[in-house]
Image (cartoon, rainbow, N blue to C red):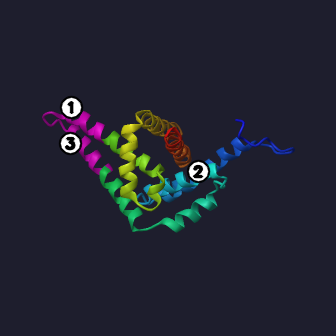
């Protein structure tokens, strides 16, 4: 609180409300970029990078978001999106097979759900890492290490995903704003781990 700038005379909102509004605009931009599905990892990674820049005094605006996204979109980002999409489809197919009544289906469903949760946490933590801007394999490796070293942070990531899903389920139009708070939560977990080191 001591590091926050005081409200100027005539200023309606303080700096925290400004960050909240900026985070929502970045979230809306991220939701639009995620619509083609293959661009989702790059969109979320860029949102995390823009929000991480707030700590360095850079503005978190939709304009800065789109400028950063234009500079970084490359074949590796679409490849990461393809891997994420294939993993999601495989996970859904596994759960459908488990629901079809195959022998050992309950145990298979538990194992598949566990693997899916681990992959989700590692994938989201990879989006929050700075390496994701240039090197997805390095970001995933470091995110896997982070997930093991920082179990509390991984639990926070799952809590953020559950909260985002609940908000989108309760009021469907909120689904377009959910990426902003999710990116902020992922960024906060990464900054928390970096500060702890």
Instruction: Classify 47 as above or below 167.
Output: below
Q: In this view, does 66 lie to the left or right of 37?
A: right
The crowd level at tag 1 (other Cα within 10 Å; few <14, some 14-19, many 20+) is some
Residue labelled with disc 1: 106
3D distance between C-alphas at marks 2 and 3: 40 Å
Q: How far apart are marks 3 and 1 (CA)?
A: 11 Å
On screen, residue 31 versus residue 136, left or right, reads right
- What residue would you read off at disc 3? 97
Q: Identify the residue position indicated by label 2 in the image.
A: 51
Position of 157 compared to 140: left or right?
A: right
Q: Is residue 187 left or right of residue 12?
A: left
**Residue shown at the point (42%, 57%) measured from the top left:** 37
- The location of residue 146, given as percent across then percent down, is 40, 42
Badge 2 local density, few (<14 within 10 Å), some, or many (20+)? many
Q: Are marks 2 and 3 in contact (CB under 8 Å)?
A: no
Say whether marks 1 and 2 touch (CB < 8 Å): no
Considering only order in the chain, which callout, 3 or 2, is on the residue closer to the N terminus?
2
Counting residues from the N terminus, which is met first, the one under dot 3 or under dot 1? 3
Which of the two residues, 162 or 185, is positioned nearer the viewer here? 185
Residue 120 percent location from the top left of the image: 37, 44
Residue found at the far right of this picture: 9
Number of the front mark, 3 or 1 = 1
Magenta residues, start to end: 88-115
Indicate the position of residue 150 as horizontal and vertical percent values.
42, 37
Tell me the SS state at disc 2. Answer: helix
Q: Mark 2 or mark 3, which is nearer to you?
A: 2
């Amino acid at each position: 609180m001591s590091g926050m700038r005081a409200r100027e005379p005539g200023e309606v909102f303080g700096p925290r409300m400004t960050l909240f509004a900026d985070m929502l605009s970045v979230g809306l931009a991220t939701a639009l970029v995620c619509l083609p599905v293959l661009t989702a990892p790059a969109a979320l990674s860029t949102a995390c990078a823009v929000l991480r820049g707030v700590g360095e005094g850079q503005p978190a605006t939709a304009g800065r978001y789109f400028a950063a996204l234009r500079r970084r979109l490359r074949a590796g980002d679409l490849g990461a999106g393809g891997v994420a999409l294939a993993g999601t489809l495989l996970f859904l197919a596994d759960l459908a097979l488990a629901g079809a009544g195959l022998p050992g289906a309950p145990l298979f469903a538990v194992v598949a759900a566990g693997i899916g949760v681990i992959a989700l946490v590692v994938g989201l933590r990879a989006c929050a890492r700075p390496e994701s801007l240039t090197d997805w394999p390095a970001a995933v490796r470091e995110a896997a290490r982070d997930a093991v070293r920082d179990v509390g942070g991984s639990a926070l990531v799952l809590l953020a995903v559950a909260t985002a899903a609940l908000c989108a389920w309760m009021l469907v139009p909120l689904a377009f704003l959910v990426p902003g708070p999710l990116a902020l939560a992922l960024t906060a977990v990464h900054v928390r781990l970096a500060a702890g080191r």
